[in-house]
Image (cartoon, helix red, strand yellow):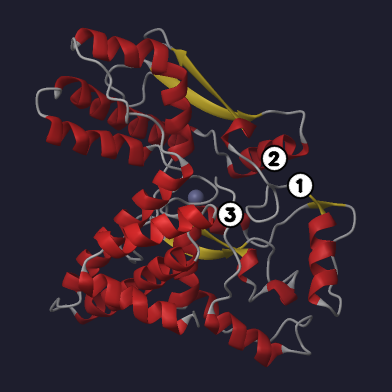
Amino acid sequence: MKSFARFEIVPPSLRERNRARKGSEALVPDRWSDDWNNADVRGLLRALQGFACWYCGSPIGRVNDRSPPRDQHAVEHIRPKSVYPFLAYRARNYSFACTLCNSKKGDRYPVVGARAAWCETLEARRERLDHEEREWLHPHQDAFEERDFSWSFRPVPAGRLWTSYPWSEGHYWHVCAARPRTVVGQRIDRLFAFFGLNDGELVTARMAEIHELRRNIELVANLSKNPALQRDYVTRASRAMSSFYPHGYALRAWFEAQRATDIAAIFRSAKSAAPPQLQPPSKTVEWALLVGRIDEMLRIYVVDTASDDPTFRRDSHAEVERCAYALAYLYIAPPGDEATRKRLRAWFDKTLSAPVRALAGSKVRALGR
Ligand SMILES: [Zn+2]
């Protein structure tokens, strides 16, 4: 779960749709046009959210009918369009969710007291929505950080609960709860309860990611004589702990909790020192890692557009468009102050290959920047 911050650019297809709906925004139409699936909208969500379901943290990859439900994803209306029709085409009301979370949620969005009703001006509407007493966490409206989550990592004696999960060393289980005294904490707790975010299947998935992270850290410890390869594994470990990645929050929490004990022991037994870069990524590094990953995927999709399978070819074209838009948003609005932005843009120009830069550049123009 990640709070979404960057938000001053409206995707062109939503701008158009909202213009067309002017005057009838408060009504539920007979049929919705699914502009939220357009490449400019999905690209924006990728730039905001990266590669994890906003609710359960499961990986979000390519859209493919053959993938299992947790791997597929949908653009989710946080406040349901049937209840808040005036938010149907507002990017602030979208997140990526796996199809399982999306169907579990349906048209639910519990509030305490009265719901925010439609009113004439956008500003007044925002004000009402901000003050609606929501039961659940909202990625755009609640400010929250990792510190609002409280993770538990405990050794489990053999034969007890959780050890039946396929975790060869049987060392840890981990469960998340919120810090209960804050409003945000209570919202997190309710969201966890509703979506079953501490259910066995998801705990197992988080454990598998932690297992992988631990293995990469072991490789880092044992590769001190091969600095280039070691750097590669440091990057992998750091990337996995990013909040743009599946279960990134859990991995970051595990790393912080085990840094002085389990992780220190790994380096002690390898008789090497932990490289200084081995740590959860800062906000700026997270951004760079996200750009790197999207770039990597875009290049794969470009190759896939030459496939013999027409459906696959069409899907791949769509993915290329989405990735190019994601890079364009990230280029236009990198995080931080002006100096950081400048530095990040320069890095962006230097890092991306010329064809990818040209693709993203065409989307920067399409976004009117
Ligand atoms: Zn999910």
Q: Is residue 132 visible?
A: no
Q: Where is residue 309, by image quadrant? A: bottom left
The answer for how far apart the CA atoms under marks 3 and 2 are is 20 Å
Q: Secondary structure at mark 2?
A: helix
Residue carrying label 1 = 135
Q: Secondary structure at mark 1?
A: loop
> Which amino acid type is shown beneath numbered disc 1?
Glu
Residue carrying label 2 = 190
Left or right side of 221 for 32 = right
Q: Position of residue 203 (x, y in %)?
A: 45, 32
Q: Secondary structure at mark 3?
A: loop
> Which amino acid type is shown beneath numbered disc 3?
Phe
State the residue at coordinates (67%, 36%): 189
Q: Between residues 238 and 67, which one lies in front from this camera angle?
A: 238
Q: Is the CB of mark 1 within 8 Å of ligand 1?
A: no
Residue 98 drawn above or below residue 157 = below
Q: Are marks 2 and 1 in contact (CB under 8 Å)?
A: yes
Q: Residue furthest left?
A: 225
Given this view, does label 3 or label 2 mark the residue nearer the observer?
3
Left or right side of 265 for 163 = right
Q: Is the CB of mark 2 within 8 Å of ligand 1?
A: no
Q: Residue furthest right?
A: 113
Point out the tag, 3 or 1, that comes first from the N-terminus: 3
Q: Are marks 3 and 1 in contact (CB under 8 Å)?
A: no
Q: Residues within 10 Å of mark 2 (few under 14, many from 20)?
A: some
> Which amino acid type is shown beneath numbered disc 2?
Arg
Q: Is residue 116 visible?
A: yes
Q: Position of residue 151 (x, y in %)?
A: 54, 25
Q: Position of residue 177 (x, y in %)?
A: 62, 29
Residue carrying label 3 = 4
